[in-house]
Image: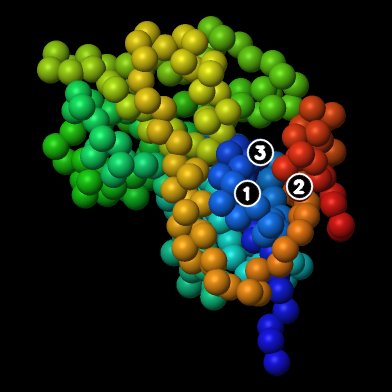
């Protein structure tokens, strides 16, 4: 007997993970994705670690029971840098995480100065520290915690509003001149941030590469599931754990991505 087909579950605290969903759709356009925004708990960036692990495991238990996904993508750095071991110990399907792209940035920098821009949670994680020790020991890594950028990306996607001066204040600490070199790559360590790239570039003191890990996440997923015939095809849907309905701008974006709000629920 063949096992029933199931969707790919793409999970974030909000709508930032849509940057990862876009990359998944480019590589795997026919696969069915369910996008889950845990907006009831947004932002994850300020949560205590133990409480956040318990919370995400609880939410994921319910989602796996309800939707029997064949693969899970944690499209959130703040969650992935903490909860992947607990999820992998609990579930058997492939689980792909999203973590700051320190390794590729350290390999590519010409100035020897990179910055990691992420939520306070991701910046504080042992996991982030280990990535740097392991892959960027010879590089100057500036760690920059942003309290406001994720919420600003939410506002941009939901209401088409952005405060350019606030963006400037948040990104300014990324721009470092060590005397030997100045920042040439900013690692986007939060999946909300790629939506802000044009706004960040517009106020940046000098041009940098904004490193978005989404294409690499999609490639990793594709490598794991490409030949898996149990991944369902077709349109999926978006679920907000807070039960809120999306404003028209966001609802349109979700429809265009094949994950309309509520969908077939
Ligand atoms: N999108 C999430 C990430 O990649 C963070 C947003 C939040 O603070 O919840 O880290």
> Which residue was labeled with disc 1?
25
Residue underneath mark 3: 15
Q: Are marks 1 and 3 in contact (CB under 8 Å)?
A: no
168 or 186, which is in the foreground? 186
Q: Secondary structure at mark 1?
A: helix
Separation (CA) of disc 2 from disc 1: 9 Å
Q: Between 256 and 95, which is closer to the camera in this rendering?
A: 256
Which residue corresponds to the image point at 20% horizontal and 23% vertical from the top-left?
A: 111
- The residue shown at (69%, 50%) is 35
Q: Position of residue 69 (x, y in %)?
A: 67, 67
**Relative image position of residue 87 (x, y in whole percent):** 52, 65
Q: Which residue is disc 2 drawn over?
A: 258
Depicted 233 relative to depicted 108: above or below: below
Q: Is residue 31 left or right of residue 120?
A: right
Lower sequence index among marks 2 and 3? 3
Query: Residue at 71% across / 67% down in the picture?
Result: 232
Image quadrant for the C terminus?
Answer: bottom right
Q: Residues within 10 Å of mark 3 (few under 14, many from 20)?
A: many
Which numbered disc flags the more N-terminal residue, 1 or 3?
A: 3
Give the CA distance from mark 2 to mark 3.
14 Å
> Is 211 placed left or right of 197 in the picture?
left
């Amino acid at each position: 007997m063949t096992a029933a087909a199931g969707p790919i579950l793409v999970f974030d605290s909000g709508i930032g993970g849509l940057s990862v969903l876009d990359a998944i759709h480019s590589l795997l356009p026919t696969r069915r994705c369910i996008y889950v925004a845990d907006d009831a708990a947004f932002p994850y960036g300020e949560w205590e670690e133990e409480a956040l692990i318990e919370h995400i495991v609880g939410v994921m238990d319910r989602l796996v029971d309800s939707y029997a996904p064949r693969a899970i993508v944690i499209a959130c750095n703040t969650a992935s840098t903490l909860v992947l071991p607990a999820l992998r110990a609990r579930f058997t399907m492939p689980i792909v995480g999203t973590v700051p792209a320190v390794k590729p940035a350290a390999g590519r920098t010409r100035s020897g100065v990179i910055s990691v821009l992420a939520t306070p949670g991701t910046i504080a994680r042992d996991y982030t520290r280990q990535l740097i020790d392991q892959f960027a020991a010879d590089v100057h890594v500036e760690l920059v915690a942003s309290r406001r950028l994720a919420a600003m990306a939410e506002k941009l996607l939901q209401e088409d509003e952005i405060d350019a001066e606030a963006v400037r204040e948040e990104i300014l600490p990324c721009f470092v001149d060590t005397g030997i070199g100045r920042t040439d790559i900013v690692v986007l360590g939060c999946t909300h941030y790629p939506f802000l790239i044009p706004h960040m570039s517009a106020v940046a003191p000098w041009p940098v590469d904004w490193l978005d890990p989404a294409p690499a996440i999609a490639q990793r997923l594709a490598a794991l599931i490409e030949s898996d015939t149990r991944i369902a095809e077709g349109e999926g849907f978006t679920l907000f754990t807070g039960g809120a309905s999306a404003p028209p701008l966001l609802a349109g974006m979700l429809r265009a991505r094949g994950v309309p709000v509520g969908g077939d629920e």
